Amino acid sequence: MMWHTSLGAAAAVFSLLTSQVVGREDVQIEPQTAQIVSTKGVILDTILDWNDAARLDHTTYNGQKYGCKCYPGRPCWPSANKWNSLNRTVDGTLHVNVPAGAVCHNTFDGPFGTIQTYDEAACADAKENFVNEQWTVEKPADGLWTYFTNDTCRPTSNPSDPCTLGSYGVYVIMATKASHIQAGVNFARQNNLRLIVRNTGHDFLGRSVGYGSLIINTHSFQSLKWTDKYTGPGSYRGPAVTMGAGVQGGDILKAGHALNPPMALVTGECATVGLSGGFIQGGGHGPWTTLKGLAVDNVLNFEVITASGLIVNANEWQNPDLFIALRGGGPASYGVILSTTVKTFPDLPAAGATLYLNATHTSDNEVIWVGTKIFHKYANHFVDNGLYVYFEIFPNQFRVRPFVAIGKSQVQLQDILRPMLDEFAAARIPYEAAFMEFPTFYDLYIDLFEAEKAGQTALTGGWMFNHDDVANRNDEIIAAMKNVVSPAGRPDLFGGMVGHLFNPGHNVPVSTSAAHPAWRNATDFVIAVLPSPEHPSLAVKKDLQNVLTNNMDEGFRNASRSGATYVNEADPFQPNWQSHFWGSNYPRLKQLRKKWDPLGVFYAVSTPGTEDWEEIEFNTRLCKKL
Ligand SMILES: Cc1cc2nc3c(=O)[nH]c(=O)nc-3n(C[C@H](O)[C@H](O)[C@H](O)COP(=O)(O)OP(=O)(O)OC[C@H]3O[C@@H](n4cnc5c(N)ncnc54)[C@H](O)[C@@H]3O)c2cc1C
Ligand SMILES: *[C@@H]1O[C@H](CO)[C@@H](O)[C@H](O)[C@H]1NC(C)=O
Ligand SMILES: *[C@@H]1O[C@H](CO)[C@@H](O)[C@H](O)[C@H]1NC(C)=O
Ligand SMILES: *[C@@H]1O[C@H](CO)[C@@H](O)[C@H](O)[C@H]1NC(C)=O
Ligand SMILES: *[C@@H]1O[C@H](CO)[C@@H](O)[C@H](O)[C@H]1NC(C)=O
Ligand SMILES: *[C@@H]1O[C@H](CO)[C@@H](O)[C@H](O)[C@H]1NC(C)=O
């Protein structure tokens, strides 16, 4: 039986590896010896046992048998010699992970003992900058949204406060070369370690942190290569850019703006989000999306390190199934992206507007909601006219900053907004609005989009409303939004929302990506934010999760027929996440996951094929049900 299982898994990997066009050379698996062998006969790797039951670290928890990843303190944990040898392979870039807040604490109590960490100057810096996104991005492993880190080492004015690792990884490779990433993937696979890939640390769902893991940091991969005429695999021959895995949205827009003529591409609204990590593997929406589609509609090629540690290309011609999976099929699931090549296009003049309606304008909260309802009624009208709109709703405040009209004049934008403003006037809704015009979208972007904050502790949910929802159920949508701000039966809690009006179907040919097909009818994608206290007990966490899933988000789901939400900006513990994130694409993605990562080297919560995995013992050890 065991032999049968082993052979089955090996055979699956055999067909996977032989079908790859490998960057360096083709490879195959020898089923008898479980060796990965190159066509030139070089043994690249030996997998001792393909069988989960034999490979994983066994435990029983709540009466269920599990096979777990290996953790510090377990007999399977690699020896100091092995770690030293890994460190040599990665040119000394392996570090013990210490959270950024440790400099404000006398000691950091890590898995390998206690070290002195207090540093007055560094602590002052940490206290000032903990909310600064870029400051945190540049740390080896810290998360910007701290809820899923377990928040066990925030900067403090009381150095005797404890500082522990919480849900962070124990070692981090600050990779500067592809071979460092390969070594990390191979080490994690061979030693059954939990592996985390960390790019910028923006993830809302905690997918760039992982208890007891080995982390690979990809932030150093900052290369940019622009071309006027792409000549790579596939039929596209227009302008493109190849970017290293660590490149962030704001930096590449800035570099594109410096070209002659200025060039642009689909990025998120947030300047500090990375493009080749979660953003692309989740789908990627941003200010250009109504005109150019999701980020994944624009990808030409990925250079990827697979779970077997090999470098392959994925594009229309080479490994086309991996190409589909990486375009929206879920982050940290199929491989580590080394570089991404995407279409670029000339930047255009743009018009923008802002709209505020808050306690400055009225003391009657209901007036704010009437205005919000009028605004939202026009959401289809806005995206059908090619706009992207970013708005926020928090207690007693509604604001749109900004309306984005790329390729349009201020007069054209005023015409598009006029019916809404006329209705505000008729309903006596007070507000403040402003219109502007810019020589390029980039100038608008710099002027009207604002930096967001790191260090926030909150749960996030969210839902997509399509054209039909907005046209036929706007009142229900607004009622659901009110329920996020003031959840039913919970006067002790409040929430807020960040909304994005866009339609990736507008003018865009439907691409064969993994993104949920329902995006093509999207009008509004709304993130729900539920703030958490800084050190919630397990009971408080359970309560907040219940409010998010079964109160706030359920209200959204009830108001909508879209059946869809965004894997990067949603509750990972919602029911039916498979169909909500991927719709009819899910079964295919689950197969591709099994094909490209048969051993479960990668893991991120609620991604294809992770149904049997669970973080047991209060969200610590990652284990598979056996
Ligand atoms: C303030 C803010 C604004 C945002 N705005 C937008 C927006 O406008 N549009 C939008 O679509 N999304 C937006 N997002 C969501 C964003 O896309 C996700 O948070 C995304 O996961 C961030 O990816 P990252 O690689 O920068 O972050 P990380 O947290 O470092 O990584 C996220 C995930 O990607 C994996 N990953 C990272 N690098 C790699 C790699 N090289 N190969 C394989 N896997 C990798 C990680 O393991 C993790 O699972 C926003 C998020 C925040 C916090
Ligand atoms: C890895 O090697 C470098 C350079 O020799 C060293 O500074 C670092 O402490 C080592 N890392 C670990 C985890 O031992
Ligand atoms: C995480 O926080 C909870 C309290 O919410 C605590 O009980 C648990 O021990 C913490 N786990 C880790 C690994 O820090
Ligand atoms: C309220 O609107 C005004 C503009 O009229 C703006 O300056 C202010 O920041 C807004 N307040 C909030 C809390 O959003
Ligand atoms: C988009 O909406 C139209 C009209 O409601 C519907 O016929 C179509 O199936 C939808 N497309 C997708 C991809 O959901
Ligand atoms: C959602 O709809 C169900 C069924 O009608 C209802 O029981 C539930 O209370 C609704 N939830 C919310 C939060 O509105």
Image (cartoon, helix red, strand yellow):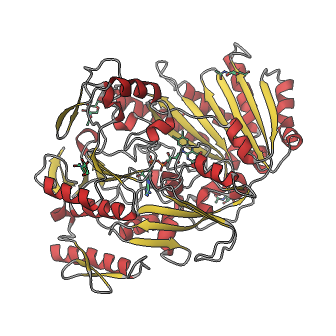
Q: Is residue 221 visible?
A: yes
Tell me residue 208's x, y (percent). 39, 47
271 or 518: nearer the viewer: 271
Residue that sits furthest to the top in the current view: 363
Does 449 appear above or below 523?
Answer: above
Ligand 5 falls in which quarter?
bottom right
Residue drawn at point x = 62 percent, y = 56 percent: 294
68 versus 203 height, above or below: below
Left or right, residue 507 beside residue 188: right
Q: Residue at horizontal 52%, vertical 50%?
A: 274
Image coordinates of residue 67 in percent, x first then y, are: 20, 56
Of 297 and 366, nearer the camera is 297
In this orientation, which residue lies closer to the viewer: 497 or 128? 128
Quadrant occupied by the C terminus: bottom left
Point out the residue furthest to the left here. Answer: 75
Picture quadrant of residue 557: top right
Q: Is residue 120 above or below residue 346?
A: above
In the image, 538 versus 568, the foreground residue is 568
Locate the N terminus by quadrant: bottom left
Write down the quadrant of residue 122 in the picture. Answer: top left
Is 426 placed above or below 185 here?
Answer: above
Residue drawn at the location 39% of the way across and 61% of the way down? 177
Image location (x, y in percent) of residue 121: 37, 25
- Percent coordinates x, y for residue 244 in the rendering: 50, 59
Q: How many marks?
A: 0
Farthest bottom residue in view: 40
Looking at the image, can residue 1 be seen? no
Q: Is 18 situated left or right of 247 in this image?
A: left
